Amino acid sequence: MARNVKLLEATMTQLRGKALEHLASAEILLDNPTGVIDHPNYVDEIINHIREVMICENAMNALKMYFVPQSPGSESPGITAPARSGMPTAPRPTTAPKVEATGRPTKKKS
């Protein structure tokens, strides 16, 4: 079944644009919260923008996973996720932490 590459690229571009728009809004709130008068609760606004960024990034990842060919010999539409603009990323744990009888997680390996 042939994929409509232009439609896939348009979807990825729109998601990338929305993610960048929300990221820019979060950066504005973080850099100069007093410059945005109509947002009385800055923390909630920043959280909402970051959630929207994650929604867009998850959608882009799902599209790449399920609809963009992954094999090296297949034709790829050249779609890439947007580069992160200076936002720090936390390392993902490789294994779940052990929980002791006290209910506190430990870093002990099993």
Image (spheres, rainbow, N blue to C red):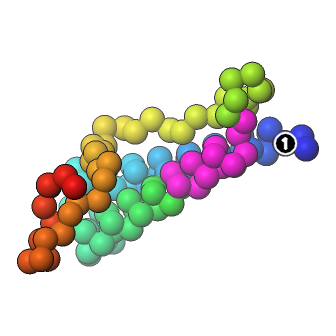
Q: Dividing the image into 4 quarters, which one contains the C terminus?
A: bottom left
- In the image shown, does 13 or 65 lie closer to the viewer? 65
View extreme (front): residue: 110
Q: Is residue 97 above or below residue 101?
A: above
Residue 28 appears in the rendering: no
Quadrant hosting residue 49: bottom left
Q: Residues within 10 Å of mark 1 (few under 14, many from 20)?
A: few
- In the image shown, does 62 or 52 lie closer to the viewer? 62
Q: Position of residue 108 (x, y in %)?
A: 14, 55
View extreme (right): residue: 1
Q: Is residue 80 above or below residue 75?
A: below
What type is the residue that disc 1 sits on? Arg
- In the image shown, does 52 or 106 lie closer to the viewer? 106
Which residue: 14% across, 55% down? 107
Q: Does residue 45 appear left or right of residue 13 in this picture?
A: left
Q: Does residue 11 appear left or right of residue 3 in this picture?
A: left
Q: How many marks?
A: 1
Q: Position of residue 65 (x, y in %)?
A: 63, 46
Is residue 65 part of the magenta span, yes or no?
yes
Q: Position of residue 90 (x, y in %)?
A: 27, 48
From the image, tell me which residue sits under label 1. 3
Q: Position of residue 24 (x, y in %)?
A: 39, 49
Tell me the magenta residue range.
57-69
Which residue: 19% across, 52% down? 109
Residue 39 appears in the rendering: yes
Question: Disc 1 on helix, strand or loop?
Answer: loop
